[in-house]
Image (cartoon, rainbow, N blue to C red):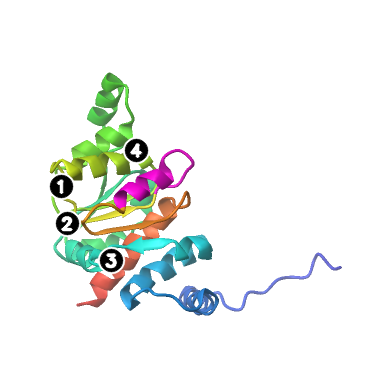
Amino acid sequence: MDFHTEFKPLTVQPQEIEEKSFEIITEELGAHDYTPEQYKVVQRVIHASADFELGRSLVFHPDAVRAGIEAIRSGKPVIADVQMVQVGISKPRLDKFGSEVRVHISDPDVMQEAKRLNTTRAIIATRKASQEDGAIFAIGNAPTALLELIRLVKEGQARPGLIVGVPVGFVSAAESKDELLKLDIPFITNIGRKGGSPVAVATVNAISLMAEQQE
C-alpha cells in the first residue's frame, strides 16, 4: 500500500462542500416526520456532528421554529450558557435584526455570587439572564443551567421566547431534557445524553438563516 498517495478532495469550495454534505445527509437520513422548517435544523445539527442518531433524537415544540424566527427578527438576544456557543453563532445574521449573543458565565458578579452561594456559575448566570423576556436561551453545555431555567419558567420568573436545551453529559443532561419536554413553551431539545455546544450553535444558526431568508 502506498501511504504517500495524495488524497484529493472532490471540491475545495465551501458552498459546494456544504451542498454535497446536505445531499448525503438527506440520502442517509431517509424518511422522517419533521416539518420542512424543522428538518433545516436537523440537517444542520447532523452536519455539525456527523451523528445521525443525534439528529433523529431532536424534539420540537410545535411553535419552536416560528418562535425562534420571530425572536430573532424582533431583535431579541440569544443567551448562551458558555462562550463556545457564543463564538459559534453567526453574528452578522443577528446584527441585521439588532440581535446579539450574550453570555454571563464569566461575569464578575456571577462568579462572586456563585462562590458566595456555593453553587455553579451556570445557575447564577441563568438567573441573571432570566430578566430578558422573549430571548432565545441556547444551552449546550450545562444541564444545571437548563434545570434552573425550567424552574424559573415554572415559577413565572422567566419568559423565554425559545429554549434550545441540548446539554451534553452523563450527569443530569438527559434528565434536564426530560423536564424540558414537560413545558408548554417553545423548545428544541433531544433525547438522551448527546448534545453539546456545536448542536446548540447549529440549531440557532439554522433558525437565524431562516429568519434572514424571510426578508
Residue 208, numbered label: 3
State yes or no: discs 3 and 4 in contact (Cβ < 8 Å): no
- Residue type of the residue flagged with mark 4: Thr
Q: Earlier in the sequence, mark 1 or mark 2?
A: 2
Q: Earlier in the sequence, mark 4 or mark 2?
A: 2
> Residue 195: percent from the left, percent from the top?
44, 52
Question: How far is disc 4 from disc 2 in space, using C-alphas?
Answer: 23 Å
Q: Earlier in the sequence, mark 3 or mark 4?
A: 4
The residue located at (24%, 62%) in the rendering is 94
Count of labels shown?
4
Residue 74, numbered label: none
Magenta segment:
167-180
Q: Which residue is the site of mark 1? A: 132
Among the 4 quarters of the image, the one containing residue 69: bottom left
The residue located at (42%, 47%) in the rendering is 174
Q: Determine if residue 106 is in view.
A: no
Q: Give the mark toward the camera: 3 or 4.
A: 4
